[in-house]
Image (cartoon, helix red, strand yellow):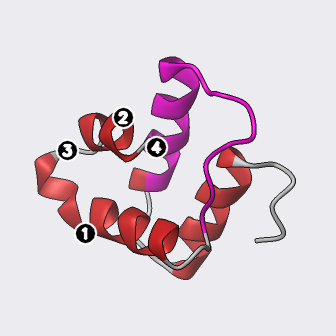
Amino acid sequence: MLARIRRLVPRSGDQHYDEIVRNFGVGTLRPPPTPMSDGELARTIAGFLREQPSSKSVATLGRRLDPSSRL
């Protein structure tokens, strides 16, 4: 999952990627219960990249990855 995300996050946005990795590590983010297509994942990541990497944007990303998330 992180390899797919890495391909979608531009190198200039490494803060965003680092925030994603950190939140997967602490359990805030979880992989989606059903696989996402590359297009769905790209749209989800694009929305995340429009904002500064913050707890609010991570929560939005979490809801897009897993709609049953309590984030």
Mark 4 burial class by Cα count in 10 Å: few <14, some 14-19, many 20+: many
Mark 1 highlights which residue? 15
**Which mark is first along the chain, 1 or 2?**
2
In the image: residue 61, left or right of residue 8: right
**Residue appearing at x 21%, y 57% in the figure:** 13
Query: Residue at label 2?
Result: 4
Of 54 and 2, which appears nearest the observer? 2
Residues at marks 1 and 3 touching, judged by CB atoms closer than 8 Å? no
Q: Give the x, y percent position of residue 71.
A: 76, 71
Whether 23 is drawn above or below 17: the answer is below
In the image, which residues are magenta? 29-48
Rounded to the nearest angstrom, the CA distance separating label 3 from label 4 is 11 Å
Q: Which mark is residue 10?
A: 3
Q: Residue 55 occupies which quadrant of the picture?
A: bottom right
Tag 2 and tag 3, C-beta contact below 8 Å: no
The residue under the point 61% across, 27% down is: 36
Callout 3–callout 4 Cβ contact below 8 Å: no
Per the model, the C-alpha gap separating discs 2 and 4 is: 10 Å
Q: Is residue 69 above or below residue 44?
A: below
User: Alpha-carbon neighbours of circle 3 within 10 Å: few (<14), some, or many (≥20)?
Assistant: few
- Please tell me whether mark 1 sits on a helix, a strand or a loop: helix
Pinpoint residue 5: horizontal percent, then vertical percent. Answer: 37, 42
Q: For residue 12, say whether it is visible.
A: yes
The numbered mark at residue 45 is 4
Disc number lying in front (2 or 1): 2
